Amino acid sequence: MSLHIAGIDHVHIEVADRDAAAAWYDRVLGLQRHAGLATWADDPMGPLILSTPEGTPVLSLFARACRPSARDATIAYRVSGAGFLAFLDDLADLQLTDANGHSVSRADVVDHDLSWSIYFCDPDDNRIEVTTYDHKVVAAAL
C-alpha cells in the first residue's frame, strides 16, 4: 500500500451549541476558531473548526441533538510534562467533571506507567483526555 498517514487531521464531535462549545474548548484547552476555515461554520449544519494556537486543525464542532455515547469514544490531547502539570494547577478554576458528573481534581490523575492522563467531559458529554509521555517529569513533581 502506498498510503502514508501523516497524522490525525481533526475529529468530528456533536455539540448542542457550537459557539458555547467553542468558548469552552478555548477556555479549557486553548483551542481557537480556525480563521482560514471559518466560512464552513456559516452553514448551520457545517463544522466550526477549532485549531491549536499554531493553526493546526484538531476539532470540528457540529451542532446536533447530542445523544449519550454508546461506547468509550475519548479524544486524547498530548501535552508536555510541564504542560500537564500546569493544566493540573488550573483544575480548580476550570471546574471540570467526569463521565459520572463528579468534579475532577489532581486525585483523578492516572499513572499508566509510561504516561500520565486525566479524563473529563465537555459540556455535551464528549470524553476528553489530556495525556503526557513525559512520565519522569510528572512523577518527580507529583
Image (cartoon, rainbow, N blue to C red):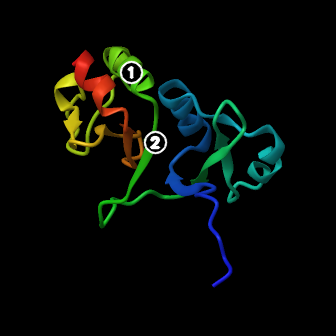
Looking at the image, residue 120 lies above or below residue 44 = above
Query: Depth check: 10 or 133 in front?
Result: 133
Residue 119 occupies quadrant: top left
| Element under disc 2 | strand
Which amino acid lies under the numbered mark 1 shown in the image of this protein? Leu
Residue 74, position as x, y percentages in the image: 37, 53
Whole-Å distance between the Cαs marked 1 and 2? 16 Å
In the displayed structure, does residue 135 sit left or right of residue 11?
left
In which quadrant is the C terminus drawn? top left
| Element under disc 1 | helix
Give the residue furthest to the left. Answer: 107
Looking at the image, residue 53 lies above or below residue 86 = below
* N-term mark: 1 or 2: 2
Residue 113, position as x, y percentages in the image: 21, 42
Mark 2, residue position? 77
Residue 81, position as x, y percentages in the image: 39, 26
Q: Which numbered circle lies on residue 94?
A: 1
Which amino acid lies under the numbered mark 2 shown in the image of this protein? Tyr
Residue 62, position as x, y percentages in the image: 60, 55
Looking at the image, residue 104 lies above or below residue 62 = above
Identify the residue shown where x is 59% and y is 36%.
22
Q: Which numbered circle lies on residue 44?
A: none
Residue 99 occupies quadrant: top left
In which quadrant is the N terminus drawn? bottom right
- Mark 1 vs mark 2, foreground winner is 2
- Local packing at callout 2 (Cα closer than 10 Å; few below 14, some 14-19, many 20+) is few
Q: How many callouts does the rendering have?
A: 2
Identify the residue shown where x is 34% and y is 14%.
89
- Local packing at callout 1 (Cα closer than 10 Å; few below 14, some 14-19, many 20+) is some
Give the residue furthest to the front. Answer: 136
In the displayed structure, does residue 132 sit left or right of residue 108?
right
